[in-house]
Image: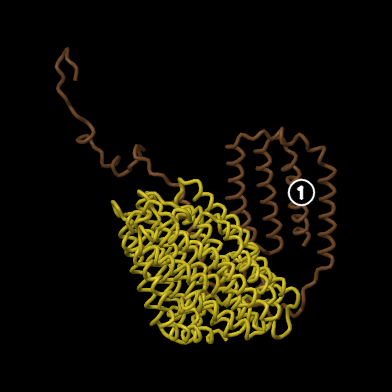
Chain colours: A brown, B yellow
Amino acid sequence: MTLATLFFYLFSAVMLASAVMVISSRNPVHSVLFLILAFFNAAGLFILLGAEFLAMILVVVYVGAVAVLFLFVVMMLDIDFAELRQGMLNYLPVGATIGLILMVELVLVVAGWSISPDLLKTVTSPAPSVTDMTNTEALGRILYTKYIYYFQAAGLILLVSMIGAIVLTLRHKPNVKRQNVSDQVARGPATAIEIRDVKPGQGI
Amino acid sequence: MWLLEQADAAAVLPEIILAVIAMVLLMVGVFRKGETANFVNLASLFGLAVVALLVIFGGSGRMTAFGGAFVVDTFARVMKVLILFGSAAAITLSVHFMKEQKIEKFEYPILILLATVGMMMMVSANDLISLYMGLELQSLALYVVAAIDRDNARSSEAGLKYFVLGALSSGMLLYGASLIYGFTGATGFPEIAAATAAGAGGLGVLFGIVFVIAGLAFKVSAVPFHMWTPDVYEGSPTPVTAFFSAAPKVAAMALLVRTVFAPFSGLVPDWQQILVFVSIASMVLGAFAAIGQTNIKRLLAYSSIGNMGYALVGLAAGTQEGVRGVIIYMMIYMIMTLGSFACVIAMARKGRQVEEISDLAGLARTDKMLAFVLAMLMFSLAGIPPLAGFFAKYFVFLAAIQANLVTLAVIGVVASVVGAYYYLRIVKIMYFDEPAPGFDPMHGEVRLIAVLAGAFSLVFVLIAQPLVNLAGAAAASLF
């Protein structure tokens, strides 16, 4: 157990440090990179808890998609972050007060947390014990059997969003030259080269 | 094998077939060379007809599938046929309109088909998750078709506005669903009903119901969640507006009916007060806000808000008669509103759409038929006997009075008298004002829908009995 404790403190310390760096670093690209580091450490914490599916999702969705999107936005938009951050010291007391209140509230909520014993009996699909099967397997079993209808419906929703994005943004421009691989491959000396007999002193 | 046991497949067969047709047509549209919109339009109409036949003749009685997430009963069948009809009308109305506005795209009928799949899923939802899935499938397709005229700022604005507010309402609905799940421990409607009957929940479930009803009230555009309606109706291309005010309204209302009755039949007094308020507010706002409108699409938007208020009167009654009233109301409302929008589509001068009410001036002298049809529809919407709209209101008010909600019924009658003013004003403008220049000749399919709707509201009194019986059987299947 000591190893797990060690890793817990390691992940937590790195995560907190990188979270501080996200808001304090001067270069916005560095901020995003620290955010990614924080996500990785959070994923590590999830693994320590035995929630490996959440850890994977965190890495795939947040690091793979959201953070990369952030990076694109930060790099493509010309935002003067130094200017944005100018008033930071002025707002610090207010921000700190709000943060403190939020923390007190969270502590109060978590301290008074209890789950009604009746609820555990009525849960439709209780999660199996981690010793029986992994999270991923448990989710997979229910997702592709009992919840196949929802799964397929979600697929249809994604299809609609794809059609929507294309309908609303795609414009066919007639003069765009596109690469056509099969044309390129089929190109040989017979079609690509034309031999002309050029008389000396005359142009083509 | 769990996957698609036969009974499951039989219950969802219409939805599966419609989804497959949509996907096949998408491939056809993408890969076929040349002009595809006409072919896809026709094929979509054919597909909708086939699916409607499947719904009607695909078995009877109550069927559930996927562990109770999906239910087919008489109520679902009646609503699905209505929805399929509304979608078919929306595609039919768009054919020439889209061509003339140069926004013809083969994706439009496909998005309508996918929205229809979503609506059918909503009507059959018997679980909070399937409710949300159906709702999102429908809404997402609607956001896109609202903005289908993408080079027009008003259409894009309509789509964006609808999207942002729709996402907000989905959030509220999900929050309510999570509260209900948290306090009852189940997402299936029968399980929630059993849990609340056993005394689980209390205030938490009530909070959940409030949020779920708020989310659904947004979808039927009931006050106080109606703000998007006039802007979206005005900005979207007219056939899209016609679609918005017909099939999705029917689906959302059916979903609301099932959501308040299936899981919360034991909590009628709790949700009844919410629905009474929403219904009164919608009727009153629909009646008063429409008076000052000069744009006919905005006027019809307020009219649809008011009409949702009347339909909710039946639901607020909380009885089987009330549900029967809602079903009859939605049936008649959908046909009347499709007819009205067909008339609005016919308002074009030299290929350009006009939308002001004053453009209708003296229509009786330039196009007798159109004026007569629109007058019949306006009389019917105003609720003047013996037209269809009168019976629609009669059945919901009757149910309210039987449930001892006399105040609600009286407010409804007063609101409908106020509302009659602006419907009759249109008739007056068409028949007694100095004629404006005539409209372009109507296209055949638009004329057909307008005339059919007008004829329906005229002869409803003759065909009322079987329809009322059908609605009664559908309502009985919920209890």
**With A67 as the anchor, is A200 left or right in this view?**
left
Report which residue position mark 1 lands on: A16
Give the image quarter of residue A118. bottom right
Query: Horizontal and vertical percent for residue A94?
Result: 83, 45
Identify which residue, A139 or B276, lies in the foreground. Answer: B276
Residue at the outermost top position: A201
Q: In terms of depth relative to the viewer, which is nearer, B50 or A112? A: B50
A201 or B254: which is nearer to us? B254
User: Helix or strand or loop: what does disc 1 sit on?
Assistant: helix
Expressed as whole percent of the image width and height from the top left, the position of residue B419 reads: 57, 67
Locate the N terminus of chain A and report the quarter of the image it occupies.
Answer: bottom right
Q: Position of residue A85 (x, y in %)?
A: 74, 36
Q: Amino acid at mark 1?
A: Leu
The image quadrant that residue B28 belongs to is bottom left
Residue B4 visible: no
Instruction: Tell me if B349 is positioned left or right of A44 in this view.
Output: left
Q: Residue at x 69, y 35 (%)?
A: A81
Q: How many marks?
A: 1
Instruction: Give coordinates of residue B27: x percent, y percent.
Output: 35, 58
From what the image shows, is residue A204 above or below residue B293? above
Residue occupying image coordinates x 45% and y 67%: B116
Figure check: A72 above or below B395: above
